Image (cartoon, grey):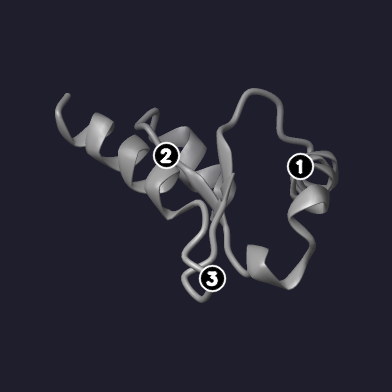
């Protein structure tokens, strides 16, 4: 799926949900682990947690920015 989305040359956002399941201090480390595992280079990956209502604003800001294009 990731390869297909990349091939469309359209903007995309990788949302790492369940960020509430790890300590806030470990989120960046977890994102780096995901990037390394998937061999991501420049892709934007954001944490997300609807349960604890954290990181939601960053995700919506990015989506809204792209919808204005």
The numbered mark, 2 or 3, whose residue comes first in the sequence reads: 2
Of badges 2 and 1, nearer the viewer stands 1
Q: Quadrant of the N terminus?
A: bottom right
In the rendered image, the quadrant that contains the C terminus is top left
Q: Which image quarter: residue 46?
A: top right
Mark 1 / mark 3, whichever is N-terminal: 1
State left or right for residue 3 relative to residue 11: right
Q: Is residue 65 above or below residue 49?
A: above
Q: Is residue 44 above or below residue 52?
A: above
Residue at (23, 38) in percent of width and height: 64
- Check disc 2: other Cα within 10 Å, few if <14, some if 14-19, many if 20+: some
Q: Which residue is mark 1?
A: 28
Discs 2, 1 touching: Cβ within 8 Å: no
- Element assignment for label 1: helix
How busy is the neighbourhood of tag 1: few (under 14 within 10 Å), some, or many (20 plus)? Answer: few
Give the label, 1 or 3, closer to the camera.
Answer: 3
Q: Is residue 27 left or right of residue 53?
A: right
10 left or right of 1 in image: left
> Secondary structure beneath disc 2?
loop
The secondary structure type at the circle numbered 3 is: loop
Residue at horizontal 70%, vertical 26%?
41
Residue at x-position 73% and y-position 72%? 21
How far across and down, in percent of the image, does residue 11 sit?
37, 32
Real-space Cα distance between discs 2 and 3?
A: 24 Å
Residue visible at 54% across and 58% down in the picture: 48
Image depth: mark 2 or mark 3 in front: 3
Mark 2 and mark 1 lie on one chain; the one further toward the N terminus is 2
Report the residue marked by disc 2.
Answer: 12
Front residue of this view, candidates 33 and 54 = 54
Circle 3 sits on which residue? 52
């Amino acid at each position: 799926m990731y390869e297909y989305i990349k091939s469309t040359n359209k903007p995309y956002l990788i949302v790492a949900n369940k960020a509430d399941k790890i300590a806030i201090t470990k989120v960046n480390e977890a994102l780096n682990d995901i990037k390394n595992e998937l061999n991501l280079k420049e892709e934007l990956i954001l944490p997300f947690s609807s349960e604890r209502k954290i990181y939601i604003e960053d995700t919506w800001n990015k989506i809204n920015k792209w919808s204005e294009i």
